[in-house]
Amino acid sequence: MFYVGFCAVCGEGTLGIRMCAGQKGERQHGVVLCDECDAVWTTLDTSQAPVFPEQPDLPCPICSASLVRHAAHWATAEEIDRLQWRHAVIGEGWALGDELD
């Protein structure tokens, strides 16, 4: 998981770039997601108030597709480049709850 900071809301999570599953026919888009409290930002500006999508599917605040099911995933380097968010990445690691292979 590529991350852009640490969550000021919960004080424990890492803010990763998550690719939404996207609606049928739409291109996937990225959001910033806390891997601990599930706070979501639709831009890199995490100084704004986050959205807290409803459990268990965490619907995307942009298109309502799931942030945890189907094709949703942590962004790859190529996807981050496409989003033009590479400048914000400060590190790479494992999200809380991700299993190591």
Image: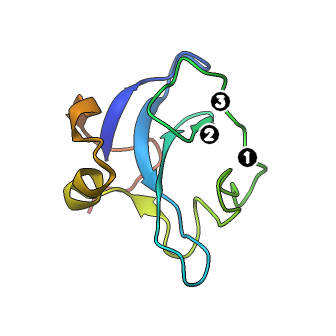
Pick whichever of labels 2 and 3 is earlier in the sequence.
2
Residue type highlighted by circle 3: Pro
Residue 48: where, in percent of width, then height?
60, 21
The answer to whether mark 1 and mark 2 are in CB contact below 8 A is yes
| Above or below for 13 versus 18 | above
Please tell me whether mark 1 sits on a helix, a strand or a loop: loop
Q: Where is residue 89 drawn, in percent x and y? A: 25, 34
Q: CA distance from mark 2 to mark 3?
A: 9 Å
Horizontally, is 40 left or right of 58 in the view? left
Q: Quadrant of residue 65?
A: bottom right
| Point 54% across, 17% down: residue | 47
Q: Is residue 94 above or below residue 22?
A: above
* Local crowd size for mark 1, using a 10 Å CA cut-off: few (<14), some (14–19), many (≥20): some
Residue 90 appears left or right of 31: left
Labels 1 and 2: the sequence-earlier one: 2
- Measured from the top left, where is residue 84 in percent x and y? 28, 46
Which amino acid type corresponds to the residue marked 1 in the rendered image? Pro
Query: Which residue was labeled with disc 2?
Result: 38
Q: CA distance from mark 3 to mark 1?
A: 10 Å
Q: How many marks?
A: 3
Check residue 50 in the rendering and tell me which mark sits there, or answer none: 3
Question: Contact (CB < 8 A) between labels 2 and 3?
Answer: no
Q: Label 1, on which residue?
A: 53
Q: Amino acid at mark 2?
A: Asp
Circle 2 residues within 10 Å: few <14, some 14–19, many ≥20: many
| Figure quadrant of the C terminus | bottom left
Pick whichever, 35 or 79, lies toward us.
79
What residue is shown at x 22% (from left), y 33% (from top)? 87
As helix, strand or loop, the secondary structure at mark 3 comes to loop
The percent position of residue 62, horizontal first and vertical second, equals: 64, 54
In the image, residue 54 above or below residue 90: below
The span from disc 1 to disc 2 (Cα, nearest Å) is 7 Å
